[in-house]
Amino acid sequence: MDEPPIVRECLKQLFERCGEDPQREGLQKTPQRFLEAFEELTQGYHQTLEEVVNGALFECTNDAPVVVENIPFFSLCEHHLLPFFGHCTIAYIPNGKVLGVSKLYRIVNLFARRLQLQERLTQQIGESIREVTSARAVFVEIIGEHLCVAMRGVQRYNSKMRTFYRFGEPIEGFPRPSASDGAYRRTCLCTDNTAADQKDWDVSAETGNEAECGLLTVTTKEFPLKIGCYSEEQMRTTPVTLTLELQLPQHYGDDDDLSSTVDYDALITYLKETVLQRRFQLLEYAVRAIYSAIQTFLKTQHKQAKIRVTLVKSLSHALLQNSRFTYGDF
């Protein structure tokens, strides 16, 4: 397959801009190879849900949950065209019919092989399974690692993003959301639960419209923080894990417009410049300082979000586990 001339010309300019020679042997066929790879990575645009399912829906009187864990996926971030990848867990309670198990893998692939946001990918998978099976309940969880975070910008590798979709009654074996559990309050990405469902979800009347929300969770893996009471601790850094959770309004992200979203790269950079270089005696002081810095940052962007910050400090003491402190609005 020959690539369109515009592809070769665009890549030629790209190579020249970074100082490469487009005529070098290793790059002469790169435009064609790139186009073939790109078409393979976006083949989901050329498939439909009906084609993927292909009628593989079967009668079933069992109402026990169907659970498939660790479905691998690869996708492309639509903002930078860099890969993000990870695993997907799907669970649903049948309503008289079950879907052929291999079709769950194919549904994940159908939407992953597009230019994507992880939030949207999670919701598309959940809504598709709900549509096809008419299930009484659907749960989808995706844990992804984004190379646009690891390779550029804040350059934080081993950082994972976790997104959820939940519909219907609670599924046994998965955490039941409640008013006090922000990580599972009312289906982070599901915006189609009815008011009648609120009682089933244990959401109190006081939470009102806050029950439906999006929750973005960003977790780092052991970055160095200057923390400790003793002089020997203050002479070195201590590895800590930071988990940042932002509880966002229900309709956050409806518009695919970057100006309406929180710039998470800028947020992490701001934390590095204002807080993460400071020295703290106690873990709780560090958590409160990070929380305050995030509050300040969001106000400058005119964004509203509830914040929860968790720090886990790795302890070297043989008889003690790692210490953890959480502080936030929910």
Image: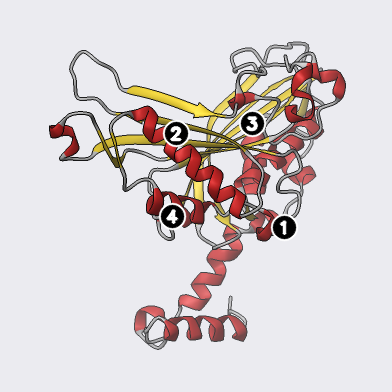
Q: Quadrant of residue 224?
A: top left
Between the C-alphas of marks 2 and 1, the distance is 49 Å
| Residue at the spot of label 4 | 269
Kind of residue indicated by mark 4: Thr
Mark 1 secondary-structure assignment: helix
Q: Decide if residue 117 is on the left or right side of residue 267.
A: right
Of the image marks 3 and 2, the number of the one nearer the N terminus: 3
Single out the mark in the foreground, 4 or 1: 4
| Residue at the spot of label 2 | 288
**On screen, 301 above or below 326?**
below
Q: Quadrant of residue 147?
A: bottom left
| Residue at the spot of label 3 | 140
Tell me which residue sits at (40%, 58%) in the image: 151
Label 2 with label 1: CB-CB less than 8 Å = no
Q: Callout 2: few (<14), some (14-19), or many (20+) C-alpha neighbours within 10 Å? A: some
Kind of residue indicated by mark 1: His
